[in-house]
Image (tube, grey):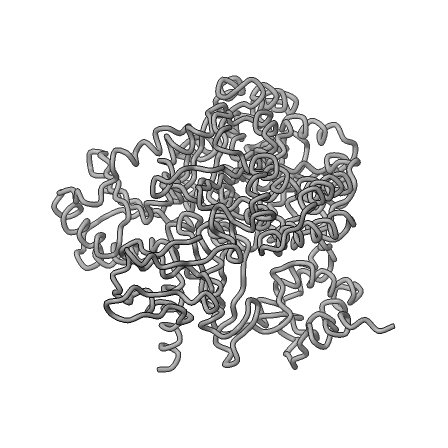
Amino acid sequence: MKCNNCEEQGLEKRFKDDEVDLSVLKEALKDYRESRNNLITALQIAQEIYGYLPRKALYFIAEEMKVKPAKVFGVATFYTQFRLKPIGKHLILLCQGTACHVNGSEFILSALCDELKIEEGETTEDGLFTLQNVACLGCCSLAPVMMIDGEAYGKLTPDKAKEIIREIYSKEKV
Amino acid sequence: MKVLVGLGSCGIAAGGNKVLQVLEEEVKNSGINLEIKKVGCIGLCYLEPIVEVIDGEGKKTTYVRVTPEVMKGIFKEHILNNKVVENNVISGEDIEYLTGQKRIALRNCGIINPESIDEYIESGGYKALEKVLKDMSPERVIEEMKISGLRGRGGAGFPTWFKWNAARQAPGSPKYVVCNADEGDPGAFMDRSILEGDPHSVIEGMAIAGYAIGAEQGYIYVRAEYPLAIKRLQIALKQAKEKGFLGKNLFGTDFSFEIKIKAGAGAFVCGEETALIASLEGERGMPRLKPPFPAQKGYLGKPTNINNVETFANVPWIILNGGSAFAKIGTEKSKGTKVFALAGKIKKGGLVEVPMGISLREVIFNIGGGIKGDRKIKAVQLGGPSGGCIPEALLDTPVDYESIVKTGAIMGSGGMIVMDETTCMVDMARYFLAFTQKESCGKCTHCRIGTKRMLEILERITSGNGKEGDIEKLEELALNVKEGSLCGLGQTAPNPVLTTLKYFRDEYEAHIYDKKCPAKQCKALITFIVEAEKCKSCGLCARKCPVNAIEGEKGKPYKIIPEKCVKCGTCIQVCRFNAIRVE
């Protein structure tokens, strides 16, 4: 019997198979390859280098650290920090913390989706923006909050959120 | 003259770096000699960015909500001409926010520069470590912790001395000390503020624990989402090594201690001890059955002591001031202080440290200043997704582990989210269940599937499709999930549902039977209406409506077309005549 769900979420769809330069990763893993306790650190390093975890890099880490690829894939998909696909130029992190939730973060989310024409977790077609929900940014007194490229924007309203996106967009156009 | 600029995460988010930049430029341009100190969070998040000017005589002026423009004014008037800029000075009422507190874990936060070990040493830092290494036996240190009555600040409240003693007694070596800085509760940022504002206090606390249990290696497991905390920890570790507070043969004794940072990768379940250890070992963060406890079999199968950030930050203070000084504060079973992150519908949100035994009401009203817009308080949520909602009627409950557990909530790590009458309690339960359902590691069936089914029921209720029997089904599932789960995540996941069912059952019933949301929050159960007699037909709502669902013309009241309306609430926010009503 074929499982539709499995096929839909199959490796081909979930992972990206870019040609990447593995020599950079090999060099960076030098101090970590000896102990398999460092698997998470190794993945963090790979993501730092490539911006996400290309499938080739995952296989390479498995080989270098002498662990089974299944385990590397297992760890990479367990933690929310790891991305299996590249992200847009600007990463929008929308806080879903409790304080933001009671202060209306869902309206900010729908405003952002509306403006960017994407759903949460997706990247715009032009590759400019990726929208991601995060558990809590910890600036609760500024709720609702979003963070774009490391800068926090607080006390948002749907209008203000759209305005901020438009501003970045217009700068990109110039 | 000295100027302190608050640069915790919240200060930076509010624009602290821009203020600092302006100040540095002004100083450079004018050529004067001025000491600029970057400090951590003082806890007054709602007033950020904060700048303090300390003049030659030591007189301190605190400026709040400082914009780059205001900073320019402060520089010209106060710093150059010694004239206080009255408009932005902190008000007497806001000072009360600080005076109502008792600061032990936060003793240095917002006061010293977290990137300067000298300032930590000046404020008495590393004296406690010196004291234990030179004058106290490990047993004596554990005894002092026992006298202090300190209990784990991560949430469960297990006595710290007991864990230390168990790790000391356990056979096997090497032993490890782990600091749990995987602060995952949404709405909680106590640990982050301590790590950002006073990292050395945690390092010193860990070294003392290392000495007490006989460990020479420590790990700080910190959330990757806290880049500033990681950066400041790295600086602090380097400085401590240079000064000889970490490394080999500390203070000329035969005790050696090292600390490494391990960045977590984003999994709420890793706050659980055994899951954290699995993650430290490079595995998926899945909990295992206890016993054996980490004190017997922890990291790499060796005896491991795990404490939370706030717990460690208390340790040097206890050693220097004595366990009995700590035990004087608080109630019979809960000693010392607790740090809370006050947020939600509260006027003055931020970080507070209060003595145990103070009532929730005092924290919310005397320190937090009450509810935004002077609305009525409905409940306060403690303990995040593992905790529960405590209703207004029980606000006189004292802050101590046992009293809070009696209400059905837990002390938790310190998130305190205040909710007013516009917060829907069913939606709140749905929110937390959505969180735990997503974060369940999937090991235990009841947690993996049970939370999913509970979430489906809650989603059904909030979208107006609740059925008779749903409440009973929720209760049954809640019990099963609690009993059928291995770790704290699953065992406590139903708490938000159970407490809201206990105190706000009528809201559930209104959703299911009357198809109404009393708090007017659940989109499927409300409609937006323009009150004709109040509408001045200014057309602002129609222009602002994102989906063009409002129609009208000059001279006649406007109308909302229900089929188009997405219930975003924009029209209510923009209407100047209060003419839009929710039903």
The quarter in which the N terminus of chain A is drawn is bottom right
Please tell me whether residue B535 is drawn above or below residue B426 in the rendered image.
Answer: below
Give the percent coordinates (x, y) of residue B178: 64, 41
Give the percent coordinates (x, y) of residue B249: 60, 36
Query: Which residue appears at 57% of the width and 46% of the height?
Result: B426
Number of labels in the image equals 0
Any part of residue B42 in sight? no
Give the percent coordinates (x, y) of residue B81: 12, 46
Query: Which residue appears at 55% of the width and 47% of the height?
Result: B428
| Camera-side residue of A60 and B253 | A60
| Camera-side residue of B241 and B204 | B204
Give the percent coordinates (x, y) of residue B574: 32, 60
Please tell me whether residue B563 is drawn above or below residue B24 in the rendered image.
Answer: below
Query: Which residue appears at 52% of the width and 31% of the height?
Result: B314
| Camera-side residue of A121 and B529 | B529
Any part of residue B315 in sight? yes
| Camera-side residue of B298 and B356 | B356
Please tell me whether residue B38 is drawn above or below residue B413 in the rendered image.
Answer: below
Left or right: where does residue B522 sit relative to residue B376?
right
